[in-house]
Image (cartoon, rainbow, N blue to C red):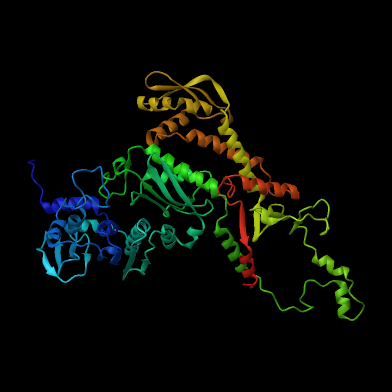
Amino acid sequence: MAIKQLSETLINQIAAGEVIERPASAAKELIENALDAGATRVEIATAGGGKTLLRVTDNGSGMTPNDLELAVRRHCTSKLDDSLFDIRTLGFRGEALPSIGSVARLSITTRTAGASEGAVIAVTGGKTEPVRPSPANTGTVVEVRDLFFATPARLKFMKSEKAEAAAISEIVRRMAIAFPAVRFVLSGSDRSTLEFPATGDDRLARMAQVLGKDFRDNAIEIDAEREDVGLTGFAGVPTYNRGNSLQQYVFVNGRPVQDKLLLSAIRAAYSETIPSGRYPVAVLSIMLDPALVDVNVHPAKSDVRFRDPGLIRGLIIGAIREALTREGDRAATTGARGMMQAFRAGTYRPQPWTPETSPFRPAQFDAMLRGVGEVPQASFAAFAAPSARTAVPAEHEAPVSQQDAPTPTPQSFPLGAVRAQLHENYIVAQTNDGLVIVDQHAAHERLVFEAMRTALHSRPVAAQALLIPEIIDLAEDDCDRLMAHAAEFARLGLAIERFGPGAIAVRETPAMLGEMDAVGLVRQLADELAEWDTANGLTSRLEYLAATMACHGSVRSGRRMRTEEMNALLRQMEATPGSGQCNHGRPTYIELKLSDIERLFGRS
């Protein structure tokens, strides 16, 4: 077949298939253009999930008539000179507007600050009309109607209007977090209005607008730097987690990205503190020299490639773990709130008291009602004493009078002083401004695990020699990468040697793992090194085993503890990083403030 030049319209429609996948893609490109134009207010209106109407209005710098005519031509942009190594804007490819115009009905109305009148241009299915004068405010209004009318096959792949509208909402949320000084308003006939007022330099306030006020109360600040790469943001405490990863936001030089390297690093940082199937909440911003990151990987610009991915991954994991060590052992406010709701949601409703309906009717009381005899004072003492099943006194071996009991100073300790043990599993401690309920098994499990992990990393792991070395055939590149980390593996009890150009011989394996699949482990390590340039699989296996041993070796539920033991447990929790959750990610304690308790009883 003869080779021929494709038409400009067909070229733009092909490009639109990569750049404009759905209405949310078009919204993203138009919002990026508004932000690059210096807008401080961006308003988005939609109808039909963005398929019928998508309008983006901004108060940016606007365009002249000559610029407007070029803006709808492919590969025309004001954001790029002659190099891709210094990209400091969100858009730069010059493909968005011509791509949208080739598959939809596009109109752009704009005016610069010094112009006496505005200008408008229309593009319908790839056909461009001349620029005309038009009344307009300073800034730009881009209106997209009937998206994909020129390529109806694409409409078959669209989701419901509700799903497409939700995708646009998510784009706006990401942009709002990235640019807190900009006011965003999202409205339309297919949604309720979503508004994010500008918060200036207060990024946490904007995050609270998008993620909810709970995030502000449960966020830990991240601020780290390594080799001129800066990492800032906020990460939620481990007990503040979600059922999906939708509340993980990562920005690279201000650009929202959804890169698997960055998201996997967040997952790895929380790997020992969050239950399986739960996801942390985090907002992270990476700042680095634009020459060290390639944002021109995909036309949608949601993926990036770093020159040193191992550095970026290590920075994220190290910074989050350091922050969790510093502050992550505090209880999430959602735990106390859940407790409050549980109390309020109780089904018990007290009935009017009468002697006949009261369950507390000793014989002496019945006699008093009949006017026969008096009730001895000792009778009331029996009913005032707590049930042995409901609350166990701290010194259960021998009753201690109130006068002889020690007087702890709760304000001296973050987790307070022990007051009682409930149901042989929960420790109740009094703090200066409330109370703390501790799950003794979960708390001790975490303490044992941290002690075992410290021992694991402070000295070489004991190894067991294989009677017959395991020979594993691998690609030569994988063998090179594995041997570069051989010393690190040897310290963890895995001794490997090169066995020819394309094979690895395993001489020793970690003794604590017992019988194991050495072939599977080494192949997993090779895959990790090829993907991330790090090999954490062996460490993870050892730590998982340590966690399992800690679970079986910790204080069991149902065991009565002395006051000294419980207080010692609390003091050790205060000194141990990550003690706010057990190895499985469940909270080890819940704190209830005195003000919350007073609200339960109507005192405030």
Q: Which of 272 and 434 is in front in this view?
A: 434
Residue 418 image offset from top left, x and y in percent: 71, 54
Dividing the picture into quadrants, the one containing residue 575 is: top right
Q: In which quarter of the image is the N terminus?
A: top left
Q: In this view, does 519 lie above or below 370?
A: above
Q: Quadrant of the C terminus?
A: bottom right
Query: Is 132 positioned to the left or the right of 146 in the image?
Result: left
Q: Which of 476 and 270 is in front in this view?
A: 270
Q: Nearer the viewer, residue 233 or 15?
A: 233
Q: Which residue corresponds to the image point at 40% horizontal and 34% vertical from the top-left?
A: 533
The residue positioned farthest toward the right in the image shown: 373
Dividing the picture into quadrants, the one containing residue 146 is: bottom left
Residue 386 image offset from top left, x and y in percent: 77, 62
Residue 576 image offset from top left, x and y in percent: 60, 44
Residue 565 image offset from top left, x and y in percent: 73, 47
Q: Which residue corresponds to the image point at 63% horizontal and 47% vertical from the top-left?
A: 573
Q: In this view, does 192 lie above or below 471?
A: below
Q: In this view, does 374 lie above or below 409?
A: below
Q: Does the image show residue 471? A: yes
The residue positioned farthest toward the front in the image shown: 114
Q: Does the image show residue 145? A: no
Query: Is 473 positioned to the left or the right of 50 in the image?
Result: right
Query: Is 253 positioned to the left or the right of 414 in the image?
Result: left
Q: In this view, does 47 lie above or below 274?
A: below
Q: Nearer the viewer, residue 498 or 249?
A: 249
Give the tally of numbered discs: 0
